[in-house]
């Protein structure tokens, strides 16, 4: 019914625009001609004509416009790239709903500006004595049950420092950051196994394990990569480093990974792009990395049987390096954990089909995608159809494991899937999305169907639930790397252009352009909105959101107090519209202050902020939340603290004074 009305409305609008645009006797109406009383065109047709909208524009507008109060059908989680965050947006409206602070402090959310709980999350990601407060987020991964998004958790990696973070989707906040003790940086993360047993992470720019010093001349001997399996405990909502393990791999510069599912459950797949083991040195007259790592015709897809790896770890066949259990290469080979398969030179993305039977490797420097079959891989392993690489790892025979190659165009990078048997691959150099048919076990069934241009230089794509066992089709988001001329000028640093495509019909159509001015999204995942059930307020007043449990320093109304013990001062404060209690805090210079604030509100959206000028303190205290901060009263004087959310008519009165006596 609704569809009928949409079509009817479209037909009416298109007909009238055709008429208005010269189909009839009248000349095209100018905006001035349409400026009736009130100064603006009145009807939909007049607006479309005045704005010069084509029928395609109107269709796009109708598909994406989301009236006030109406909810989006999907939630899109985009990595923020080197802004170190994750961005949640609605689809199809493409409205940004939340910037989730992860690796980078963010004062609006009170993340990393004094709050002890969030500082502890960030500090867990420090490297040695260096406080790390930046990151480069690449690949968000929603938690899965039986290979389908379950809406409980979101994982995200930091490429620069080889870290993984856990975001709890009950409150869309970061709960944990873990630092890989073996790798200083890592790219191929995060990807989850079908029941979120593990979060998979592949390395990239290899170093000696634990990034110990070793000259580049010792590259082949000492430098190594890993495929790391971070154990996730769903009941605790935490990665458990002690139960995690790594599989050692050669210094081939691993790239993206994906976890097997259904037919390939138990496997993980990671690409690589420096089988040359080239070590660079352009300043010494060597060819640059870009030339050196692209000399050979093939690189290696890494095939890791994580179920067998888990058995070997449980049987104690590991070495502990820097606190991480490591399956060394010879053990991994002996246990049937690690294999390689040749792939055309310097590929990029690897993506497993919804049924888990096919593994799609995108060529990057090769115009094809190469499709491998898990059945063929198994047969090649059983039949020992391999040669060995110089580390003793079996390289499976390419012709034995390859199912098909499809020529798509220039720069294929990443692949997603829909519910109609199509695969979609981004073409970086063509600036296009290719739609192609998955042919199953018929090598001739793999065919390019169409290509749709995007602006410009597309990286990842994300289709609705497009990397699960049950893709939805409908929408696909193109994460483009350049915007060039798409938006008003904002100086030399431009936003990226995220484009929404309607993939439900016979022809893909771009229906929305979204400038992303707060980061450089790499990958995104799109989940059906009704799978998410976040809290409106915390379950009880006095809640610690990091522990997801009642807070130690929760303060009830009437129990506000300031306790002094020598120069140790403890403050128990409450906030509720429209007062902070206490309103006077008397300190002496040199005091050590521990300050706890509980938001007594139980009403949805009744968040209070708290900032203390001169002390770098910024908190966001959501309804029911208790948070704490500590500081040394090093600056004497008279200070104001106050609420930062415009929460009521008396918000400006929501303040207090802190006196620090010299
Ligand atoms: S990959 S450069 Cu996701 Cu295309 Cu990180
Ligand atoms: Cu609370 Cu303003």
Image: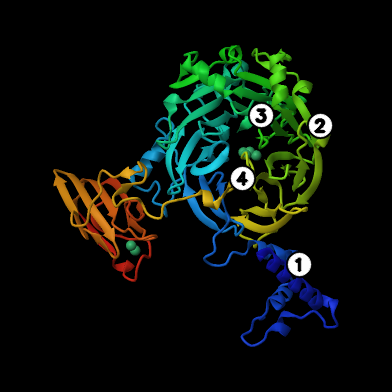
Which is nearer the N-term, disc 2 or disc 4? 2
Q: Quadrant of residue 51?
A: bottom right
The answer to whether residue 516 is left or right of residue 544 is: right
Q: For mark 2, does the 10 Å Cα neighbourhood hold few (<14), some (14 to 19), or many (20 or more) residues?
A: some
Label pair 2/1, CB-CB below 8 angstroms: no
**Residue 160 image point, x, y percent:** 54, 36
**Residue 189 image point, x, y percent:** 56, 34
Q: Nearer the viewer, mark 4 or mark 1?
A: 4
Label pair 2/3, CB-CB below 8 angstroms: no
Residue 55 is tagged as 1
Is residue 528 visible in the rendered image? The answer is yes
Q: For mark 1, does the 10 Å Cα neighbourhood hold few (<14), some (14 to 19), or many (20 or more) residues?
A: some
What residue appears at the point 45 percent right and 41 percent down from the top-left corner? Answer: 133
Front-most of residues 41 and 91? 91
Give the residue pinned by disc 3.
Answer: 271
What residue appears at the point 47 percent right and 20 percent down from the top-left corner? Answer: 325
Is residue 661 visible in the rendered image? The answer is no
Q: CA distance from mark 3 to mark 4?
A: 23 Å
**Residue 158 image point, x, y percent:** 52, 38
Q: CA distance from mark 4 to mark 1?
A: 29 Å
Quadrant of the drawing holding the N terminus? bottom right
The answer to whether residue 167 is left or right of residue 372 is: left
Q: CA distance from mark 2 to mark 4?
A: 26 Å
Which is nearer the N-term, disc 1 or disc 3? 1
Q: For mark 4, does the 10 Å Cα neighbourhood hold few (<14), some (14 to 19), or many (20 or more) residues?
A: many
Residue 443 is tagged as 2
Give the residue pinned by disc 4.
Answer: 465
Where's ligand 1: which quadrant? top right
């Amino acid at each position: 019914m609704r569809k009928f009305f949409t079509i009817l409305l479209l037909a009416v609008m298109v007909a009238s625009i055709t008429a208005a645009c010269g189909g009839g006797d009248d000349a095209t109406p100018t905006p001035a001609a349409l400026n009736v009383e009130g100064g603006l065109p009145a009807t939909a047709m007049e607006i479309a004509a005045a704005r010069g909208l084509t029928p395609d524009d109107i269709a796009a507008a109708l598909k994406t416009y989301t009236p006030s109060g109406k909810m989006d059908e999907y939630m899109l989680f985009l990595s923020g790239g080197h802004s170190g965050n994750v961005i949640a947006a609605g689809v199809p409206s493409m409205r940004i709903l939340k910037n989730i602070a992860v690796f980078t402090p963010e004062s609006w959310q009170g993340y990393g500006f004094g709050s002890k709980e969030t500082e502890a999350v960030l500090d867990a990601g420090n490297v040695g004595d260096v406080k790390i407060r930046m990151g480069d987020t690449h690949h968000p991964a929603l938690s899965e049950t039986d290979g389908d998004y379950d809406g409980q958790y979101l994982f995200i990696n930091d490429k620069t420092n080889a870290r993984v973070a856990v975001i709890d989707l009950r409150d869309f906040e970061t709960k944990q950051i873990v630092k890989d003790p073996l790798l200083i940086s890592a790219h191929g993360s995060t990807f989850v196994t079908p029941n979120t047993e593990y979060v998979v992470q592949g390395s990239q720019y290899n170093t000696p394990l634990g990034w110990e010093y070793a000259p580049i001349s010792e590259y082949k001997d000492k430098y190594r990569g890993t495929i790391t399996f971070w154990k996730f405990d769903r009941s605790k909502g935490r990665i458990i480093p002690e139960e995690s393990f790594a599989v050692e791999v050669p210094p081939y510069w691993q790239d993206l990974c994906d976890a097997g599912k259904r037919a390939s459950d138990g496997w993980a797949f990671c690409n690589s792009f420096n089988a040359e083991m080239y070590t660079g040195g352009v300043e010494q007259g060597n060819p640059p990395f870009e030339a050196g790592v692209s000399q050979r015709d093939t690189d290696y897809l890494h095939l890791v049987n994580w179920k067998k790896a888990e058995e070997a770890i449980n049987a104690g066949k590991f070495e502990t390096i820097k606190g991480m259990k490591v399956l060394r290469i010879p053990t991994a080979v002996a246990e049937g954990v690690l294999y390689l398969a040749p792939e055309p030179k310097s590929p990029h993305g690897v993506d497993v089909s919804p049924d888990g039977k096919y593994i799609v490797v995108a060529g990057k420097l090769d115009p094809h995608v190469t499709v491998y079959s898990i059945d063929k891989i198994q047969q090649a392993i059983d039949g020992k159809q391999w040669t060995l690489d110089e580390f003793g790892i079996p390289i499976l025979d390419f012709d034995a494991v390859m199912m098909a190659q499809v020529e798509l165009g220039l720069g294929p990078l990443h692949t997603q899937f829909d519910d109609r048997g199509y695969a979609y691959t981004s073409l970086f150099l063509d600036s296009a999305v290719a739609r192609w048919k998955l042919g199953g076990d018929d090598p001739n069934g793999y065919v390019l169907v169409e290509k749709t241009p995007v602006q410009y230089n597309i990286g990842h794509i994300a289709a609705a639930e497009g990397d699960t066992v049950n893709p939805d089709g409908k929408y696909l988001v193109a994460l483009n790397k350049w915007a060039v001329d798409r938006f008003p000028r904002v100086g030399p640093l431009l936003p990226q252009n995220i484009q929404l495509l309607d993939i439900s019909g016979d022809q893909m159509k771009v229906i929305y352009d979204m400038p992303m001015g707060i980061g450089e999204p790499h990958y995104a995942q799109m989940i059906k909105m009704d799978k998410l059930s976040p809290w409106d307020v915390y379950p009880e007043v006095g809640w610690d959101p990091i522990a997801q449990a009642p807070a130690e320093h929760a303060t009830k109304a009437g129990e506000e107090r300031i306790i002094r013990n020598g120069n140790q001062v403890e403050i128990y404060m409450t906030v509720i519209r429209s007062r902070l209690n206490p309103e006077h805090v008397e300190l002496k210079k040199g005091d050590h202050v521990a300050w706890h604030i509980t938001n007594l509100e139980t009403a949805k959206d009744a968040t209070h902020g708290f900032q203390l000028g001169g002390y770098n303190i910024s908190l966001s205290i959501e309804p029911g939340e208790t948070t704490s901060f500590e500081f040394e009263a090093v600056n004497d004087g008279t200070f104001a603290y106050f609420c930062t959310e415009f929460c009521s008519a008396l918000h400006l009165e929501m303040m207090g004074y802190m006196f620090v006596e010299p």
